[in-house]
Amino acid sequence: MREGPDIAEIASLIGDPARAQMLMALADGRAWTAGELAREAAITAQTASAHLAKLDAAGLIRIEAQGRYRYVALASASVGDALEALLRLAAEQPKPKRKPGPRDPALRHARSCYNHLAGEVAVQLTDQFLARGWLKASHDGGWQLSKVGVKGFADAFGIAAAQLGSKKPVARPCLDWSERRPHLAGPLGAALLDGLFEQGLVRRAEGRAVAFTKRGEERIAALVGSRR
């Protein structure tokens, strides 16, 4: 007798090449139109609509209609985490040896991982947060924000502890696809990426890549030192 969630159904939905391509496009944390996802997966609008209906029924995406457009986004951070985990797993399969993660230097340097920052910069920042005592390990396997961290995140990124909500843990490690070391996720990770955008420290680049502005480079360098 089978017990527990039916992972085979979810796996089969993600495993279709066209659906996987659309889900990976949505992993940048933004909402895409159905037409944009169809072009991304190189399929017709009708085929894309059928795929999206299946993903929506399974709770992997959410669809909102605005005027004549339908906007699609991942249903939750858990879906983004699952996709990132699958990327890491796929990269570990026997293949000609090369660095894990994306080949594109811009993606390796900094990218969005659903709603938080990933890549080389994200890992370096997380190292600093831990070294400075802004984050401390918690009993639930996540990280907790220390008193010095409350001030540090507020001063450096304008993040107020009150805006993080009551969800626990407030911060958690997410194993980075390319660096193979943890970067910051959870409500605090999402607030960090939002703050970087709001302050004009980063901008969207191609795909999931995130580019730091000159002010952003200076702000990060002040925390982690020169990265190039």
Image (tube, helix red, strand yellow):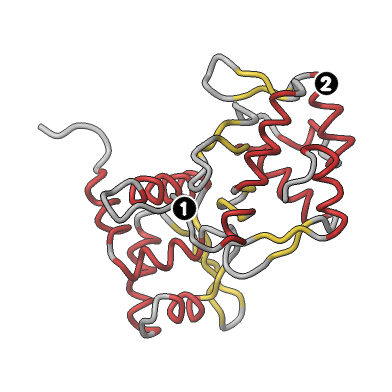
Task: Decide: is 214 above or below 225.
Answer: below
Q: Which residue is mark 2?
A: 148
- Residue 136 appears left or right of 9: right
| In the image, farthest residue toward the top | 139
Task: Decide: is 157 above or below 58.
Answer: above
Camera-side residue of 157 and 34: 157
- Mark 1 residue crowding within 10 angstroms, few (<14) / some (14–19) / many (20+): some
**What's the distance in space between the residues labelled 2 and 1, CA to CA?**
33 Å
Q: Which residue is mark 1?
A: 101
Which tag, 2 or 1, sits closer to the chain's start? 1
Indicate the secondary structure of the residue bearing disc 1. loop
The image shows a total of numbered marks equal to 2
Tell me which amino acid carries mark 2: Val
The residue drawn where x is 62% and y is 61% is 106
The residue drawn where x is 86% and y is 50% is 218
Tell me which amino acid carries mark 1: Gly
Camera-side residue of 134 and 63: 134
Q: Are marks 2 and 1 in contact (CB under 8 Å)?
A: no
- Residue 64 picture location, percent across and down: 55, 67
- Residue 122 appears left or right of 49: right
- Residue 177 picture location, percent across and down: 48, 46
Indicate the secondary structure of the residue bearing disc 2. helix
The residue drawn where x is 67% and y is 19% is 136
- Residue 35 appears left or right of 43: right
Q: Nearer the viewer, mark 2 or mark 1?
A: 1
The residue drawn where x is 77% and y is 38% is 224
Task: Decide: is 163 above or below 76.
Answer: above
